Amino acid sequence: MAAWDAQAKRAFRAHVPSRFCGIAGSPDAYLSISPSLAPDTASAQRIAEQGMESVEARARLFIGRGTVRTLRSGTRLKVVDCPHLPKDADGPYPLLIDLVEHCGINNLTADTQATLARKLGGLDAALTFDTPPSPPESGPGPFGFMAPHEVIERFTPTADLLTAARAHGYAGQFRAGDARRPWRPVVSHPDTGRLYAEPTARGVQSAIVVGPTGETEASGDAEHHTTPRGQVRVRFPWQQGERPDDRSSRWLPVAQRQAGAGMGWQWLPRIGQEVLVKFQEDDIDQPVVIGALYNGQGEAGIAPTPGGQVAKGVRQEADPETLYRLGSDSAASAQGNLAAGHSPAWHGLGTEAEGHRNAAALSGFKSAEHGGRGANLLVFDDSDGQLRTQLATTQAYSQLNLGHLIHQQDNRRGSFRGQGFELRTDGYGAVRGQAGVLLTTYRDATSGKAVPTGDNAAGIALIRQAKQLTSSLSQGATTHQTAALSTAKDDSAPLAQQEKAASGMVDGKALDAARQDAAAGNTTTQGKVPHQSDATVQLAGRAGLVAIAGQDLQFANGESIALASGQDTNVAVGKQARIHAGQGIGVAAGLSKAGDGNIGLQLTAGQDNLDVQAQHDVLGLLSKDDLKLVSANLHVDFAAAKRIRLATAAGASITLEGGNIIVETPGRITYKAAQRSFAGPVTQSYPLPVFPQGVCVECVLRAMGKQHAFANKNG
C-alpha cells in the first residue's frame, strides 16, 4: 500500500503478508489511497493490515438456511456436527453472520389463503425484495482466492427458502464467515473505490476565493492570497461560521492546463472570484480548483431569470439602449456590473449599433491590473467574414492587430480600419533580428501563394540590376577619366557583398546543416531554401518605398552608400544642399547619351553666386569643342598670383607675368581700334582668395582608429 504526501513531497508505504488465504506464487495486491487516510507511515501500516483482514475475512464464506428468527448481521453462531463445515479440533465451528435474507409467511387457513389469492393474486408474486440482496464476492479475488458460490442476481427468494418458509412460517438464508477472523469492510467499492466509510463530497461545488481575513473583495492592489505553489483558499456557500476568515478551507491547488518544471499555464484565481471545486476520489479533504465561473449581471445585460429582472415602476440608472449609445471608437460603455459578482469581459446578442455590433463572436483572455483599470488582452474575433486577432496591453496602448482591423473598446466592435496587420504603440518601438530582417511586399507572382520565409527573389533581382548598372556606369566614368564607383570595383565591393548576403541558401531538412550553410554563406540552390547569409536589413517594395520624416531624415553607415535607379534620381531641397567629401567627388554625366535639351551636366545658380574652387591643387575646365565664359551684365575677371597665359594650338599666346605682358605669335598681330592710347606704367592690385594651408592628419588617423565614418579635417 502506498500514499503520497504532496505537501512534504514524500511517499508512505506499508506491506502486510497474508495468513489464511492465497495461492503460492500469486502476485501481490497493490492499493493507492488518499493522503488524508495515511498522513504518516504508521497510518499506512494500519490501513494495510485492515485491508488484509478484509481480504482474509472473505477468503472462507458459507451460505446456509435456518428457521431461527433472531438471525441478524453480526450475530455469532456455533454449529455442531455439520457435514458441510470443516472439522474443528476446538469443538463447534464458530460463524459470524454477515448477510441475512428473511422470508416469512402467515400461518393461515386454506380458505383464507384461497380468498387472498383470488383478490390479491398469487403469494409468490408478492414475495419480492425492495432491492436485490448484496452479492457475495465471486471471481478471482486478491491473492488468487476464488469465491465458492455464485453471484446473487435475483429479486425473489429461492425455491428452497420458500418451501421452508411455507412449512415453518419463517425461513432465513444467510451468509457467514469464520468468526475467529477479524471482520473488516470490503477493501474497495465498485463505484467509489473507498477503503472504508468516510466523509465524501461527490460531484463539483462552487466557492468564492477569500483573502487573509476572509474578505471576498480585494483591498487596493492585494488581489491574490496564495502560497508559493499557487494554492488559494475558498469559502463554500454552506460555510458561514462565527469566524469567516480564510480558515474556512485548506489551501486548494489550482488545476492548470499544463504544469511542469518551470513551464506550463499559470492562472491564479483572485480574491472574490467564484471557482469550481472538485474533490479527488470524492474525498472532502482533497479539494482542487478546476475552473472559474462568471456570476454577475453585466450592465445593460439581460437578466437570466424573471427573478433577476427589475420590477415594473422601479427606476433604473440607465436603460440598455442609452448605455450602448454612450460607446464610441475611443470610449467604452456598458462594462459595469448591476449585481454583485463578475460578468464576462465580452458579451453578445447585440448585432446592431445599439448593441455594440457584437454577435457573441469574441473569445480569448483578458487580465486585470492589480489595483488599477489596465489589462492585457488576447482577443479572437470570429465574426463571419471579419476574422480578427488582437494581442494588446493598455500600457502605452501597445497592440498587434491581425486580419479585419476595427476599433475595439472592450465589448464594442467599432468602425472598420482596414485589413492586414498593425503593430502600434504610444511608447517606444523596436524591431531586432540578429540574423537579419526582411520587409517586402513581393509574393509569388505565378501561384499567388506566400513565398518561403527567407525568400527575396525580387529584391535579389533588383540588387543585381543595381550592380550591373553601377558596374556599367563605373566603367564609363573610368573611360572618361572620372572617379570610378567604389561600390562596383570587384566581388568584394559592397554591392557584390549585399547580393551574396541576400542570395543565401540553407539546408531545408536538417537544422544543424542549415546553421552550417548560414555560417558559411552558402549560395548554392540544390535542395536548399532561401535565407540571408549575413545580418542585413532588406527592404523591397513592389510598388515603391517611401521614407518621410517630419523633421530630420538621416542616412549614415560605416563604409559606402550606393544610390542606383534605372531611370531618374531627383533631389529637391527647399533651402540649401551641401555635399562634403573627405577625399574626391566624381561627377560623370552623359555616359550613355545626353540628357534633355542635349545637356550632359548642368550647374545653375538661379540667384547669388556660383562658386567653384580648387583650394589645394589645379582647377581644370576642359572641353572637346567650345569653352564659353559669358557675363551677361558685368565683367569677366581672370586673376592669378603669378602668371596668366592664353594660348592656341598654332602657337600664338599672350602671357601676363609679373608686371609684363608678353605677346607671342608665329604669324602677324592685328590691331583694330577706333583709337589707340599708350600711357605710362600703372600698377593695380587684385585681391586673391585665402585658402586653408593643410588637413588635420592626426584627426583623420584618430577617426580611422576608432572606425568612425566621419572626421573633421581641420581639427
Image (cartoon, helix red, strand yellow):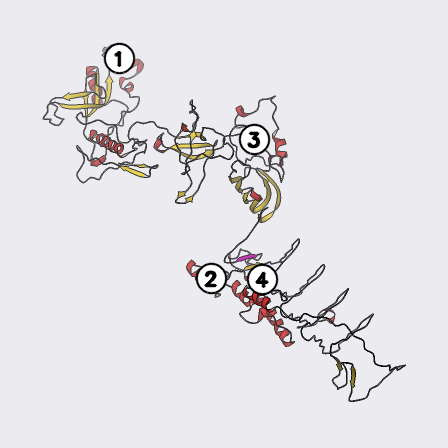
Q: Position of residue 391 (x, y in %)?
A: 53, 44
> Which callout, 1 or 4, points at the residue further toward the start of the chain?
1
| Residue identified by numbered label 3 | 301
Q: Residues within 10 Å of mark 4 (few under 14, many from 20)?
A: few
Q: Which amino acid type is shown beneath numbered disc 4?
A: Asn
Residue 66 placement, left or right of 568: left
> Which callout, 3 or 4, points at the residue further toward the start of the chain?
3
Q: Residues within 10 Å of mark 1 (few under 14, many from 20)?
A: some
Q: Which residues are magenta?
A: 429-439
Q: CA distance from mark 2 to mark 4?
A: 24 Å
| Residue identified by numbered label 4 | 557
SS for callout 4: loop
SS for callout 1: helix
Q: Nearest to the eye among marks 3 and 2: give it.
A: 2
Q: CA distance from mark 3 to mark 1?
A: 71 Å
Q: Nearest to the eye among marks 2 and 4: give it.
A: 4
Q: CA distance from mark 1 to mark 2?
A: 104 Å
| Residue identified by numbered label 2 | 518
Q: Nearest to the eye among marks 1 and 4: give it.
A: 4
| Magenta stretch, main secondary structure class | loop
Residue at x 31% of width, y 21% of height: 130
Q: Which amino acid type is shown beneath numbered disc 3?
A: Gly
Quick check: can you spot residue 510?
no
Query: In the rendered structure, does residue 430 fall within the stretch colored magenta?
Result: yes
Relative to 68, does residue 63 appear above or below in the rendering? below
Q: Position of residue 315 (x, y in %)?
A: 61, 23
Q: Which amino acid type is shown beneath numbered disc 2?
A: Ala
Residue 700 placement, left or right of 294: right
Query: In the rendered structure, does residue 150 fall within the stretch colored magenta?
Result: no
- Looking at the rendering, which quadrant does residue 164 occupy? top left
> Which callout, 1 or 2, points at the residue further toward the start of the chain?
1
